[in-house]
Image (tube, coloured by chain):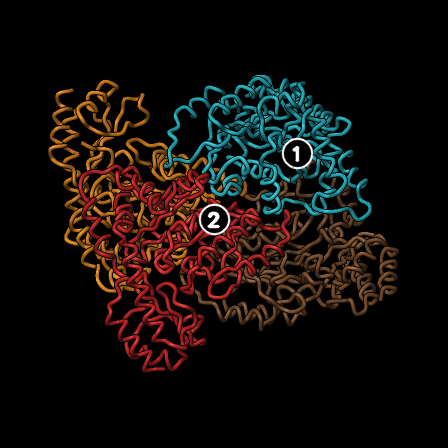
Chain colours: A cyan, B brown, C orange, D red
Amino acid sequence: MRFFSDNTASACPEVLGALGVVNHGRAKSYGDDEWTRQLDEKFGEFFGTDVRAFVVVTGTAANSLSLATLTPPYGVVFAHEGAHILNDECGAPEFYSGGGRIVGVPGANGKLTVETLGRVLDELHVSVHSMQPAAISLTQATELGTSYRPEEIATLSALARRHRLHVHMDGARFANSLEFLGCSPADISWRAGVDVLSFGATKNGALAAEAVVFFNRDLVRDFELRRKRAGHLISKSRYVSAQLLAYLADDVWRRNAARANSLARQVGMAAGAALLYPVEANELFLKLGAEGKKQLREAGFEFHPWGGEASGNTRFVVSWDQPESDVAALCKALRERT
Amino acid sequence: MRFFSDNTASACPEVLGALGVVNHGRAKSYGDDEWTRQLDEKFGEFFGTDVRAFVVVTGTAANSLSLATLTPPYGVVFAHEGAHILNDECGAPEFYSGGGRIVGVPGANGKLTVETLGRVLDELHVSVHSMQPAAISLTQATELGTSYRPEEIATLSALARRHRLHVHMDGARFANSLEFLGCSPADISWRAGVDVLSFGATKNGALAAEAVVFFNRDLVRDFELRRKRAGHLISKSRYVSAQLLAYLADDVWRRNAARANSLARQVGMAAGAALLYPVEANELFLKLGAEGKKQLREAGFEFHPWGGEASGNTRFVVSWDQPESDVAALCKALRERT
Amino acid sequence: MRFFSDNTASACPEVLGALGVVNHGRAKSYGDDEWTRQLDEKFGEFFGTDVRAFVVVTGTAANSLSLATLTPPYGVVFAHEGAHILNDECGAPEFYSGGGRIVGVPGANGKLTVETLGRVLDELHVSVHSMQPAAISLTQATELGTSYRPEEIATLSALARRHRLHVHMDGARFANSLEFLGCSPADISWRAGVDVLSFGATKNGALAAEAVVFFNRDLVRDFELRRKRAGHLISKSRYVSAQLLAYLADDVWRRNAARANSLARQVGMAAGAALLYPVEANELFLKLGAEGKKQLREAGFEFHPWGGEASGNTRFVVSWDQPESDVAALCKALRERT
Amino acid sequence: MRFFSDNTASACPEVLGALGVVNHGRAKSYGDDEWTRQLDEKFGEFFGTDVRAFVVVTGTAANSLSLATLTPPYGVVFAHEGAHILNDECGAPEFYSGGGRIVGVPGANGKLTVETLGRVLDELHVSVHSMQPAAISLTQATELGTSYRPEEIATLSALARRHRLHVHMDGARFANSLEFLGCSPADISWRAGVDVLSFGATKNGALAAEAVVFFNRDLVRDFELRRKRAGHLISKSRYVSAQLLAYLADDVWRRNAARANSLARQVGMAAGAALLYPVEANELFLKLGAEGKKQLREAGFEFHPWGGEASGNTRFVVSWDQPESDVAALCKALRERT
């Protein structure tokens, strides 16, 4: 019973099926096919505004490429100290930006706050001797499975604007937050001040497909050239674009996210006092201790420690395709433990 | 009737079908799944030697990442002046190497020769003021649809070794050359002195899957870190590795290549004196002139000019899935033109 | 009365005079002159071991170029959170390394300690997803004007070795520490485990001359190419090498440092309880408060706030050429304030 | 008798003397001193227009840093195939631009022409797959000791503008061309369409001082940050700025250049038919053959072969401080040889 990560999940039938549907004839390549050409329109409908949308195959590429358009080589991106771009991408943003820097900022529940970010920005001494503030990056859902509320994003964006910083969002689990919040996609993106969004689909049912959605379209040409130059412009682009189209259509994204979120909530309730953060997406962080971890592992549950094995803390991620029996067993094991 | 490129082709049923076969359960991610773990063994069998094989989704990534392991930031890679890495990748090798340089070398039929490359290497004045020779890169099949013979590769590799250069091969159409030559994979790779091979599958039936095959395994760890850092380590790795496994199994690669090559040869024969280079893979270069191009386009054939519209030269690429009717019609049109 | 920094100082007569001495005839360029060719030997004598020594004109160049030889593009350098390489070089190490990262580590009195650095190193989770630990960088004298003792450096180096990290020293004020400690140059460099040293001369009497001294000589060729590539190989090299030769000869470095250190100690004693850190070089950090700062500024003293104007803390740097009257006046002002 | 290069020359007394003049007191650092603050004005007077002028210590730094402000990482700079930036800087422009490319263009006498450059620009197929044309770089005097006439520069600049390219000039020997041409500095810089000029002083009498002069001032802030980040912002800036001020004052630049040019012309006349290119600065290229080279070397003349020892061609550079006896002896040897 594997709760390692939602990137262990399979692809959902709607997305996998779409590959077969487009698999006919000789389609123009490098984004000039009829499916890729629909992305701007479909994402525009989804977000309720004009956008430019581009497809890449990993979240790291989506984040790094979009950040590289927002920051000069001597630029600084401010992100939560637990952010994926800071800790889990082998320095991809540094590589793509040509030597930029990510500065980690603390904040409860995995969130930047106007207080913590504001303090860091206020204390900056910017001169020719220092790297230059360029952008902030918010993660939605956060690395701790919480979700920024629309007004939290808007307030942080406004703070960023006052400091002349761009706003990027790492939305690897954007769908899970969106489903949890029940708001419109606009509410937690452009309307709240986001310039560029890494819109994840892979974790929530695609094989390998993420969109980079530009609400601020000035930097689009730079992005396109950087994407090609990085080997992230897919030649048979129809097979990645088709995944995104299927994912957006018929609320596939929502159904997958809703299922994962709902099952995660069940686990969260079963976990009781062991729960470290509110369950606002499909991830759970549980304080199990050495003994609790051992018991669950012996019972066949696979999960990652969090913050080092010694901490006794753990992360469980519920995938869109997680069997209900896995979840029921986990809930039972957690309840009996309590 | 589309002869633009083999990257307009669809995916072959064996490869597409493999995606469905692996689409069950929660598989470990980032290359730790049971399919990705087979790559070293399967490619080792294919090449008849121990190798390390890694999957990426584009040829540009395969080429740039492998070249980056072979050259320091101040290094020079020598390649044919028509090479894809020099002309068609928006400077990806420069980006990945941190500012390296590709030096184009002339040579008939798209091939480097011991004479042309030797002359360039002999004339180098290497000092602290110059960039440092680091590697050569051979393209198999070449950009002009010709194939290096095993002894040509071996002689070029020996020349490279004498100058202490690594040997890279861009094998975006490796299968087409291999089928044309009828030799073993070893004969045109490690046995002929190749250190690292970009082994293409996308153009010949996969959706998006290329292998980077290391025969010289010293630089593997550097490659793995650079791949992750570039966003080319796929999270749901099973879906790309499965493509490569299916492609290698049951001679799929050979059947697809043989079909494309054979159809291309038919076109080549029909082209008669218009044929610019020998047909040794699945590409054709035809001198059609302005009038010839116009006629064929009006007859519904899609193809690229080559060397500028003004030259009157053209490129036709026959895909593995090209309808025989397309080819018959093209042959007929070419013959009637002659 | 200017106490901003020792880089406001003039050049000492011995160093300036040396420029005239070498200013005759047409000398070979780019380091092939008779003066530059003496650097290895003279620095070897100074350090009591075989070294390779190279000259550059800024400390930022010395630090960044030497760090770039010690870390891959995906590497991490651990340094004190107040380190110049982290805060005052506009991201030079990131630029030179091709996207590496400096991780700031806390520690009292501007020093890394085995406890604080050890904790950071022990908590690392190194995988293909993380940047790779590559080196530590120690600053001697530290940014707070303190000096590492030989055994402190040796213990930190040993810790670094256990984690397979290289050891770099930023010695912009190396002479000041050396004079303060009264030990041999070897004791706080190679004998204590330092691989590469940025040996400063500019602040202590040169016009613009810093040496990069390699005790571990494996990486020298890489350094030389990176230096040229960065535009830091001076064509008329005699004029920078002559500065270093004059600086090393006849204990010029020591006399200049001794004077600055001694005057700084006088100020330190005068400061009494306002002194924030022990005076172990030529810098002083004083808690003056808003009123104290105002009084001193009105009395004609120029100095920098430290940690923001609001903190009330200040930095005074005593230069090798500081007039005694400046120092006497400052001491008097500080004593009367107390 | 050393004719290797003008970077073997000594510093002229006016420049060296200026170092002593500024060597008093504690001057503000990093360009905030009274001498550096004069650079804009003095260079503005020299060029007859408003400029921003910055000092660095090498031509490589001046060229690379200014080119980096003119080209994105995926940009192409077009330069003569013999250009220093292409052949003699170990890839510095590639490094500074983050992976840009220099494309060498042929042209007689070391000059780009509207024909050769125009052909290259016209044949470009710019798309997302190609690197993007960004700038041209002209060398004045050229690498073959010739000088662009004002109208040649203006015509090339106009061609560049039509292709939306910036114009950079590598003026390592700007003074020599200016003296030869007898025109105003404006005529061969901003008035002829140059955006940024690397204005050399080192070869013509300074110790180590080059100016980067921005006529197009939009990119100045980017330059300043890149310069600091590269370790090329000198802390004791007075000592480099003073060199430039002395060099500009009282026609020092002109006297030095005039002397070197005049002596070079004498050698050129003595060389007779061996002279390969017109002498329009202070460099001579002579076809001496193996025997001629041998004779001259045995007679005590030091010079570089040009285009490989085998070619029999040679380069002689006359420095501003070349003894007349050297020149007389060389003229005599050349005449007797003829």
Residue A133 visible here: yes
Q: Quadrant of residue A20?
A: top right
Is A314 displayed left or right of A251 in the figure? left
Is A86 displayed left or right of B111 in the figure? left
What residue would you read off at disc 1? Answer: A52
Q: Quadrant of residue B270?
A: bottom right
Q: SS at mark 2?
A: loop
Q: Quadrant of residue D175?
A: bottom left
Is B28 displayed left or right of A324 in the figure? left
Q: SS at mark 1?
A: strand
**Front residue of this view, candidates B14 and D81:** D81
Tell me: residue D277, above or below residue B93.
below
Is B4 displayed left or right of C241 in the figure? right
**Label 2 in the same subunit as label 1:** no
At label 1, which amino acid type do we have? Answer: Arg
Q: Chain of mark 2?
A: D
Say few, some or many: other residues with alpha carbon within 10 Å of mark 2 (under 14 / 14 to 19 / 20 or more).
many
Q: Position of residue A51 (x, y in %)?
A: 66, 30
Q: Position of residue B145 (x, y in %)?
A: 71, 63
Say few, some or many: other residues with alpha carbon within 10 Å of mark 1 (under 14 / 14 to 19 / 20 or more).
some
At label 2, which amino acid type do we have? Answer: Gly
Q: In the drawing, what numbered circle is on residue A103?
A: none
Name the residue at 37% across, 66% down.
D283
What residue would you read off at disc 2? Answer: D193
**Front residue of this view, candidates B41 and D115:** D115
Q: Position of residue C100 (x, y in %)?
A: 45, 43
Q: Chain of mark 1?
A: A
- Distance of label 2 from label 1 (alpha carbons): 36 Å
Residue A2 visible here: no
Q: Position of residue B195 (x, y in %)?
A: 58, 61
Name the residue at 22% across, 53% down.
D14
- Position of the N terminus of chain A, as image quadrant, is top right
